[in-house]
Image (cartoon, rainbow, N blue to C red):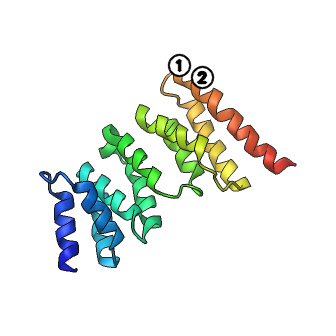
Amino acid sequence: MDEKLVAYLEKMIDPDEKEAYYFADKLGEKADEEVKDKLLVLLRGDHWEHAYLASRALAKSPFKEEGLEATIEAVFDKKFKSVQGAFAQVLELYNLEFKFVDILKIYLFGNFKASQLAEGYLNEVEFDISPRTIRKAEKHWNHYLHNPEDDGSLQIKKDFVEPILLEMKDLFSE
């Protein structure tokens, strides 16, 4: 790996570095296959701050799709449950057009911050929807209905999700 990229990587994960975001962005802009592999290892690792920065770097790289998949995995990773919102937040750097079901799952099953960010994405992103997407979304919605975290949030989420699902179904029934 190029010496400059090694330096960027080291600075990105240095806990005393005040410009870690800058180095993550620079690393992403210049990433090659080797850098991508190292970033994916960090993203799937145990240190959430390194994982977050690796996701940010991947979002700026030519390997956005792989970074997006790994970031969504991180959102649902039990070891990152307490910082789920950070990973949901970094999703804004990615193209979420084909990730309606994943964003819906984050809305339904994520912690408060992750759920609120996902609600924003559901309102703002223009998703690519197919009948299969609707079926998968309904499957997760039904799972949530049978396993809500509490009755108060059930009604709030019901008021938000059901009109969306109905509108999507109407698109394909015409």
Q: Is residue 49 left or right of residue 147?
A: left
Q: Is residue 52 left or right of residue 144?
A: left
Q: Residue at x 59, y 56 (%)?
A: 97
Tell me which amino acid carries mark 1.
Gly
Separation (CA) of disc 1 from disc 2: 6 Å
Q: Residue at x 16, y 65 (%)?
A: 10
Q: Name the outermost residue toward the top.
A: 152
Percent across and percent down for residue 35 are: 29, 73
Between 146 and 7, the one lying in front of the other is 7
Q: In the rendered image of this protein, does residue 72 appear above or below residue 112?
A: below
Tell me which amino acid carries mark 2.
Gln
Instruction: Specify whether residue 111 is in view.
Output: no
In the rendered image, which quarter contains the N terminus?
bottom left
Disc 1 crowd, CA 10 A, few/some/many (<14, 14-19, 20+): few
Percent across and percent down for residue 38 are: 27, 69
Say what secondary structure mark 2 lies in.
helix
Residue 169 falls in image quadrant: top right
Q: Residue at x 68, y 38 (%)?
A: 164
Percent across and percent down for residue 81 are: 34, 40
Q: Name the outermost residue toward the left.
A: 16
Proximity of marks 1 and 2: CB atoms separated by less than 8 Å: yes
Q: Which residue is mark 2?
A: 155
Instruction: Specify whether residue 124 is in view.
Output: yes
Q: Residue at x 48, y 34 (%)?
A: 116
Marking on residue 152: 1
